[in-house]
Image (cartoon, rainbow, N blue to C red):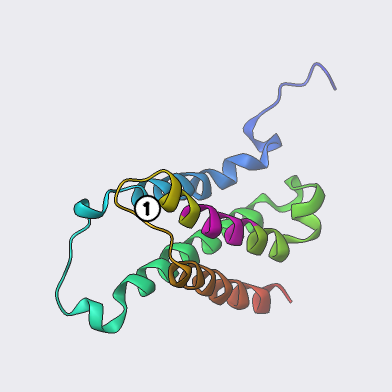
Amino acid sequence: MLNQKLTSTHFPHRFFRWYYLWTLAIFVIIGLPGYAIPSIRGLNLINFDKFVHACIFGFQAFLAFQAIKKSGNLLTGFVKAHPVFSVVLSGVLLAGLSELFQSWFFIQRSADIGDFIANSFGLFLVTAFFFKKIK
């Protein structure tokens, strides 16, 4: 066993690379200063900002479920035993952290409970879709 060469097939994390990259992209996007975000007239009337938040975190959940599905038997532990709960927990934590980071660290940004709710809504919407497919 010790003489066997380990390949990337031994590590399920390779399936999570898009998930990790998207997580990084989320923090880059939310870290943009307020003046760097374009304002488009008319879109404020339909809460376009909340729609974008829901899409960003819905896509995050989609990537997580795809990674879990592709990992198959390579996953172990909690994520394998509770894939839906793992995605929801990590997504809600990321949603909360993103809002806190906007409040604490980023220039001209502030935390917004409405954004957190929109983030969570996108996450739960995609989770509901995949939960039906898993059952």
Give how far across and how far down residue 36 sits, in percent: 20, 51
In the displayed image of the protein, which residue is found farthest to the bottom?
45
**Residue nearer the viewer, 107 or 56:** 107
Question: In the image, 75: left or right of 52?
Answer: right
The boundaries of the magenta stretch are 90-98
Q: Residue at x 63, y 56 (%)?
A: 90
**Quarter occupied by residue 68:** bottom right
In the displayed image of the protein, which residue is found farthest to the right?
1
Question: What type is the residue that disc 1 sits on?
Answer: Ile
In the displayed image of the protein, which residue is found farthest to the top?
3
Is 119 one of the magenta-colored residues? no
Q: Residue at x 59, y 77 (%)?
A: 129
- Which residue is denoted by mark 1 in the rendering? 30
Q: Quadrant of the N terminus?
A: top right
Give how far across and how far down residue 108 sits, in percent: 29, 51
Question: In the image, 127: left or right of 58?
Answer: right
Is 92 one of the magenta-colored residues? yes
**Residue nearer the viewer, 20 or 114:** 114
- Crowd tier of the residue under label 1, counting other residues whose Cα lies within 10 Å: few below 14, some 14–19, many 20 or above: some
Report the number of numbered marks: 1
Judged by its main secondary structure, the magenta piece is: helix
Task: Please say if 33 is above or below 96.
Answer: above
Give how far across and how far down residue 127 sits, in percent: 60, 71
Question: In the image, 47: left or right of 77?
Answer: left
Give how far across and how far down residue 25 sits, in percent: 40, 48
Q: Residue at x 74, y 77 (%)?
A: 135
Q: Residue at x 48, y 49 (%)?
A: 23
For numbered disc 1, what is the local secondary structure? helix
Task: Please say if 128 is above or below 108.
Answer: below
Task: Please say if 90 is above or below 115.
Answer: above
